[in-house]
Amino acid sequence: MLKYMALSILVVSSVNSMELSPNQIQASHRLGDLSVSLSDEGFKVNDSLVQRYNMDKDLRDIKRAQLARLLTAGSYIAVNQSNNDEYSLQLQQRIRGGGVIGASIGSSVGFFGTLFVGASAIVITSWAAGPLSPAVIYTGLTGAGPMLLAQAKINGIAGGILGGTITGVI
């Protein structure tokens, strides 16, 4: 697997330039097949030099080794073409996600955390009622319970998405 990744990352030619593989480039289908390379002169798209002002600031002074590390980590280069036929380049990140365990943990923390904080706030506030505290707790939980449950579900979904995205494929 590592060999395959290393081979797909870059091709170094004899003229000291680095050509990006197709899976490291994203462009519109109307542009057709593109070749993007980085040489001592700068980035070239289909042998046309890309002007510095048309590049993402992270790409302007990037070295080949830095670009190789970024591409290995899952980044890619988005290529656009303007009306005057100049190409522009932007460095983009692929968001890795799909961690089932992280999503489960995040969902549980979001859901039960919301219920705990909400119910605790009702209970702590009701202590001020003194001897009527149990009645205030019951009234508060039955009155605010549906809204609290709805918010807990929303926070559970958000926590699951966040947990799955952060943990990746764990």
Image (cartoon, rainbow, N blue to C red):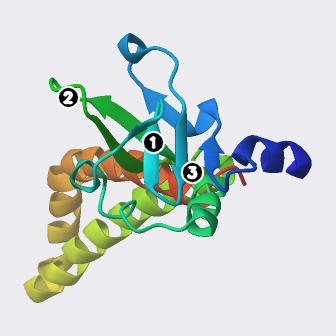
**Of the pair 31 and 49, the residue shown nearer to us:** 49
Q: Quadrant of residue 112?
A: bottom left
Disc sitting over residue 58 in the figure: none
The residue indicated by pointer 3 is 103
- Are the residues tagged 1 and 3 within 8 Å (C-beta)? no
What's the residue type where badge 1 is placed?
A: Lys
Q: Residue at x 28, y 49 (%)?
A: 51
Give the vertical position of 47 relative to 162 (above or below).
above
Q: Is residue 42 above or below residue 146?
A: below
Q: Are marks 2 and 3 in contact (CB under 8 Å)?
A: no
Residue 164: percent from left, percent from top: 55, 51
Label 1: how many Cα within 10 Å (few below 14, some 14–19, many 20+) = some
Q: Residue at x 75, y 41 (%)?
A: 8
- CA–CA distance between discs 1 and 2? 15 Å
Query: Sequence order check: which comes first, mark 1 or mark 3?
Result: 1
Q: Percent x, y for residue 66? A: 57, 68
| Tag 2 residue | 82
Residue depicted at x 54% and y 60%: 166
Q: Residues within 10 Å of mark 3 (few under 14, many from 20)?
A: many
Depth order, front residue of 115/143: 115
